[in-house]
Amino acid sequence: MSQRSVSVRNGSGDTAIQEVMQMRNVVLFGESGVGKSSIINMMMGEEVAKCNNGAQGCTLTATQYTIPLDSRVCVQLWDTVGLDEGSAGTTIAVEAKRHLEQLLKDELDAPGGIDLLIYCIRADRVKRAHQEKYRFVYEKVCKKAVPVALVVTGLEIYAPEGDMDSWWSDHEKEIQRSQYDDGDDVRRFDISKERLLNLLKEEFRAVGVHSEFQIK
């Protein structure tokens, strides 16, 4: 969490006060084509991130977007390279992994660090590879020091009748075998703008910071 000063002018154009916005740092990660860029576009309310639903990744480098939650809090949201990109992709798998690891380390070392990781998977099925990627980011790189939200996309295809919450109960055993709940700080969310906004607001306001908004 970091702060950014914002000058606010009164009606005559003079600088009246200076607000200090709380900037929250959030990193999305996951395989190619799981909808990371679509989540960015949904949150932004416009198409700012290039999307590709195929296996070949379209996000070659990490890109940062700023999303205001309210007058006091902004989110810096990182769209990252797909972790599974191999010979069929533009970025080889080892390079994708290296780029993500370096981004995470840089942000962890920066003032404010990383406030939240959002791990994106598709509703098709819970794969062993999901666990490996999750452990790489959460344990190896972030040393279990950053909370994680597990976001599932494609639920409208999995549950065309609208019962999207059924995915969690249908995959409970697979998730347990993947050890997402083995004492880890993981929260589960399906994909909707309202739920993601609530996730960000609840996550950040649970930190115990009372001076989110300061006037000098």
Image: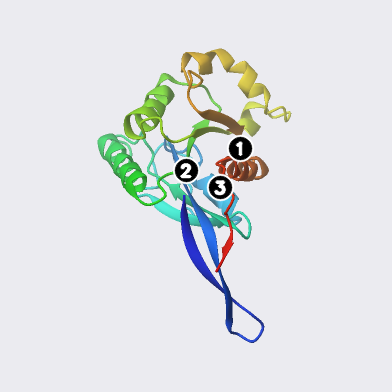
User: Which quadrant of the figure contains the C terminus?
Assistant: bottom right
Q: Nearer the viewer, mark 3 or mark 1?
A: 3
Among the two numbered marks 2 and 3 on one chain, the one whose residue lies closer to the N terminus: 2
The residue positioned farthest toward the bottom in the image shown: 12
- Give the numbered dot on residue 209: 3
Mark 2 Cα within 10 Å, few/some/many (few <14, many 20+)? many
Please say if the residues under marks 2 and 3 sit with CB atoms less than 8 Å apart.
no
**Residue at the spot of label 2:** 115
Amino acid type at circle 1 is Ile
Mark 3 Cα within 10 Å, few/some/many (few <14, many 20+)? few
The structure residue drawn at horizontal position 48% and vertical position 22%, both measured from the top left corner, is 180
Among the two numbered marks 3 and 1 on one chain, the one whose residue lies closer to the N terminus: 1
Kind of element beneath mark 3: loop
Amino acid type at circle 3 is Val
Vertical placement of residue 22 versus 98, above or below:
below
The structure residue drawn at horizontal position 62% and vertical position 27%, both measured from the top left corner, is 158
**Whether residue 90 is visible:** no
Decide which of 118, 160 is in the foreground and name it: 118
Residue 63 appears left or right of 172:
left
Decide which of 4, 96 is in the foreground and name it: 4
